[in-house]
Amino acid sequence: HADLLKEYPSARPSIEHMIDYIPRIKPRLYSIASSPNEAPDNIALCIVVDDWTTPNGIYKKGLCSNYLTQQDPTKSNSIVAKVNAGVVAMPTTHDVPMVMAGLGTGLAPLRGMVRDRVWTINNDEEARKGGIGEMALYFGARHRKDEFLYESEWEEFHNGGKGPLTHLRTAFSRDQAHKIYIQDKIMEDPELIYDYLVNKKGYFYACGSSAVQDLKHYVAKCIAKVGNMTEEEGAEYVTQMMIENRYCIESW
């Protein structure tokens, strides 16, 4: 609003009008990127500073994300925050497969899920006896070098296919001449998608920008292809998964 007033100095709205027109600053909602079992007294967040250049060439940074970068834990800085109830359903046992798809900072809740299952493997003998389900992670971003969040963790958990993260599929759309997206990687694994979601009644998680909402169409295509169904029947299966809280979306 200040930028607009500077650009059009002849506009002189009253203070009363400005107070009525300009909304209050809304609280920012961030997904928790840690496991409560692994770290019950700490919460990890995955936040990327939002920045952009206005049409007038002015460089700007996000109000909240930039503010957080200026906080110094060594100086006992504190912020006002609260924890809201989760919006996605989790399997009641750890023997159920999880297929996870994240774009950008959509990795945050997926990291929490993976770390929680890894903690269970290392600390819960009864759960290990019941079996540990497979985990497949699909991640999409523009460039691997700057945007592969938690890369070393994923590589460690995957361990060349021998770790608890049984499948790691990445799509960096701008790292080659032709663009590769997360849905392309999903479409390369129809048998895996069908086995984990249909045969083993697993869960699918899509987290990130609003683009992840379209992934259900590609999941449906995979199910239809392997299950000898029509695409309409594949879509109906995904809809039923949503009803059963086995297909979960967290997007913004």
Image (cartoon, grey):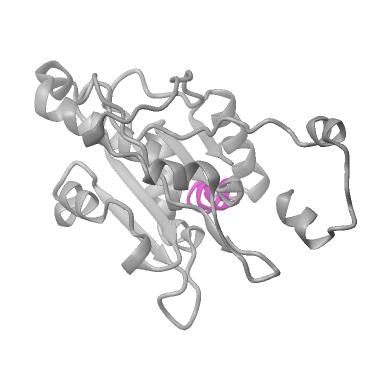
To which quarter of the image does residue 216 belong? top right
Q: Is residue 216 left or right of residue 71?
A: right
Q: Position of residue 92 (x, y in %)?
A: 35, 18
Res 216 seen here: yes
Q: Residue at x 40, y 24 (%)?
A: 90
Query: Which stretch is magenta?
Result: 215-227
Q: x, y percentage for residue 24?
A: 68, 30
How many marks can you see? Answer: 0
Classify residue 68 by image quadrant.
Answer: top left
* Pick the front one: 19 or 229: 19
Residue 83 % position (x, y): 43, 20
The residue at 14%/49% (across/down) is 162
Quarter of the figure that contains the C terminus: top right
- In depth, the one of 41 and 8 nearer the eye is 8
Vertical position of residue 112 compared to residue 89: above or below:
below
In screen coordinates, is 144 left or right of 121? right
Q: Choose top left, top right, bottom left or bottom right for residue 140.
A: bottom left
Q: Does residue 244 sit above or below 214 in this rendering? A: above
Compared to residue 138, the image places residue 19 above or below, namely above
Magenta stretch holds residue 55? no
Query: Is 107 placed left or right of 56 in the picture?
Result: left
State whether the magenta stretch is mostly helix, strand or loop.
helix
Residue 99 visible in image: no
Q: Is residue 36 above or below residue 99?
A: above
Q: Position of residue 225 (x, y in %)?
A: 52, 54
Image point (47%, 22%), residue name: 86
Closest to the observer, 214 or 134: 214
Q: Residue at 35% of width from left, 65% of height from top? A: 146
